Image: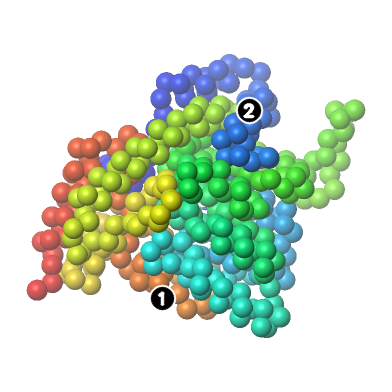
Amino acid sequence: MINYGKHFIDNEDIKSVIRVLKSNFLTQGPKILEFENALKKKFGAKHAVCTSSGTSSLHLCGLALKWTKRDLILASPLTFVATTNAALYLNAKVDLVDIDKETYNIDLDKLKFKLNQLKNKKKNIHTLIVTDYAGHPSDWSQLRTLSKKYKFNLINDNCHAIGAKISKDEKYAVRYADLVCHSYHPVKNITTGEGGSVLTNNKQLYEKIKILRSHGMLKNKQKPWKYSINELGYNYRLTDIQSALGISQLKKLNRFIKRRNEIAKFYNDKLKDSRLFEIPKVKKNIFHAYHLYPLKIRFDKLTISKDMLLKKLRLKGINLQIHYIPIHHHKLYRSKINSYLPNTEEFFKQVVSLPIYFSLKNSQINYVVKNLRKLIYSNLKK
Ligand SMILES: Cc1ncc(COP(=O)(O)O)c(C=O)c1O
């Protein structure tokens, strides 16, 4: 089966993990610090905390920012549900702002409108979580300006965009956002099996997150057998086994992203001339990380539904996915959100994610395109 995403593990990765398995520490040893230092260097962060997942990273950010039921958290509907679930864990309120038609990231004009609307009602948002969807960075310089003007915290849910750049800068995420979350799930740009991290330049938030990652434990440096617990924390730690894999994977990130860009170009060249497809657009000065390749298909011009297309392609061994079922479509959110989100609705009708990952072969890409085109062109409306 050609899946929409897949990890890539080589001998170096395996050797790194085996070395830890033969060492004295499987968790809470030296590898986690080494991975955190490597992340800090690569992404220009003063601080990094590795965690058990992207989801726990987001939860820790909410805890550190002290979200409560009185706080309003804004996000875009085009993200994985973990983004907004973090707010629900802390009983905070969630609202959504529609996506931009070109980048599929949060629409800045609609965001400004929402912020002004709230301001007129003497309300404010607490935090904006922005997902750099598919790996295309948002307009972070404008987002930073808005966060200063309207005084809200800014989280970059950077789970898709690890390795992306703005104006050749791969350190953009920490430069603009207060907190940056990564996920190292196997379909992401690098993997630790499960895992994630929070990157930040804010020392206070870093210290808080570090303590809450490990039960809220405050260690006594003079008497290492003693610790105190003053607040509720979690076990959201990454193991040394996983960290060793992360260190080894991070060394390959640039190579991974280069190949993802080659694959995207291949799809672009094969699909751009058809009026039935819309390939992803890339803004000037953006280096896309292509965690996903979202292709829009004009199902309104076809006799085949999206479900049927995906079903038929699965029979050919091709597993496309849909990113995402918008947040407000889920039952959990239906009663909580009543924003009008037309761009997201339109996008959701059309989008499928084509397979994209480091080890995808050119022959497999050809196979995907051939089968996709065949199904689309044999099901045109008269
Ligand atoms: C945008 C986004 N946010 C958060 C997450 C959660 O990450 P994890 O699966 O590591 O918990 C994911 C991953 O699926 C994601 O794609």
- Mark 2 to mark 1: distance in Å? 45 Å
The circle on residue 362 is none
**Amino acid type, label 1:** Pro
Specify few, some or many for label 1: CA neighbours under 10 Å numbering under 14, 14-19, or 20 or more.
Answer: few
Specify few, some or many for label 2: CA neighbours under 10 Å numbering under 14, 14-19, or 20 or more.
Answer: some
Question: Which residue is outermost to the right?
Answer: 222
Quadrant containing the N terminus is: top left
The residue tagged 1 is 342
Tell me what residue is drawn at x 35 percent, y 71 percent: 346
Q: Can residue 88 be seen by looking at this rendering?
A: no
Judge by depth and name the residue closer to the eye, 363 or 305: 363
| Colour convention of the picture | rainbow
**Amino acid type, label 2:** Glu
Q: Can residue 285 be seen by looking at this rendering?
A: yes
Q: Work out whether mark 2 precedes mark 1 in sequence or the reverse, and give the earlier one.
A: 2
Relative vertical location of residue 43 with respect to residue 117 in this rendering, above or below: above
The circle on residue 34 is 2
> Whole-percent x and y of residue 255?
40, 33
> Whole-percent x and y of residue 90?
68, 61
Relative vertical location of residue 235 with respect to residue 19 in this rendering, above or below: below
Judge by depth and name the residue closer to the eye, 336 or 57: 57
> Whole-percent x and y of residue 4?
33, 47
